[in-house]
Image: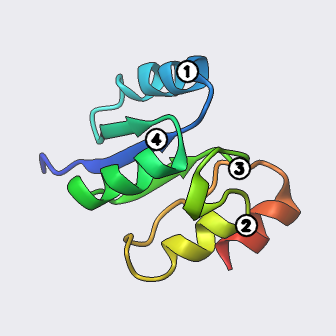
Amino acid sequence: MSNMKIRLVLADHHPAVLSGINHGLAVLPTLEVVGTAADLGDLIKLLDMKPCDVVITGYAMRGGEYGDGMTLPAYLRTGQIPPGIKSGQYETGVSSSALH
């Protein structure tokens, strides 16, 4: 059996959401949360320092120069960040727009 884990970065401006997701994922042996961020500026800094396979983020986040909502997925697609989940938005129209 492989010891390889999927490395996740979580970002949300609600501390309870970050804590809950982090706690829920901690029991899954194939996943490893390598970092969390409370705003987009911190998320971008974290992604520059920590390699990850998947980014799970809220839709409406503070972030200064990186924007939020539809701006973040566009930034992530510039090649700075590996492919993966780039929005935690559950509304189908928003999610599919963000990922294309």
Res 70 label: 2
Q: Position of residue 63 (x, y in %)?
A: 58, 50
Residue at numbered disc 3: 59
What amino acid is found at the position of numbered circle 3 in the picture?
Answer: Tyr
Q: Does the residue at mark 3 contact the one at mark 1 (Cβ under 8 Å)?
A: no
Q: Is residue 81 above or below residue 13?
A: below
What amino acid is found at the position of numbered circle 2 in the picture?
Answer: Met
Q: CA distance from mark 3 to mark 1?
A: 15 Å
What amino acid is found at the position of numbered circle 4 in the picture?
Answer: Leu
Sequence-first disc among 1 and 2: 1
Q: Is residue 42 above or below residue 23?
A: below
Q: Is residue 14 above or below residue 31?
A: above
- CA neighbours of label 2 inside 10 A, class few (<14), some (14 to 19), many (20+): some
Residue at numbered disc 4: 10
Q: Is residue 85 above or below residue 42?
A: below
Q: Position of residue 12 (x, y in %)?
A: 58, 36
Sequence-first disc among 2 and 3: 3
Sequence-first disc among 3 and 4: 4
Residue 25: quadrant of the picture: top left
Residue occupying image coordinates x 54% and y 73%: 75
Q: Does the residue at mark 4 contact the one at mark 1 (Cβ under 8 Å)?
A: no
Residue at numbered disc 1: 15
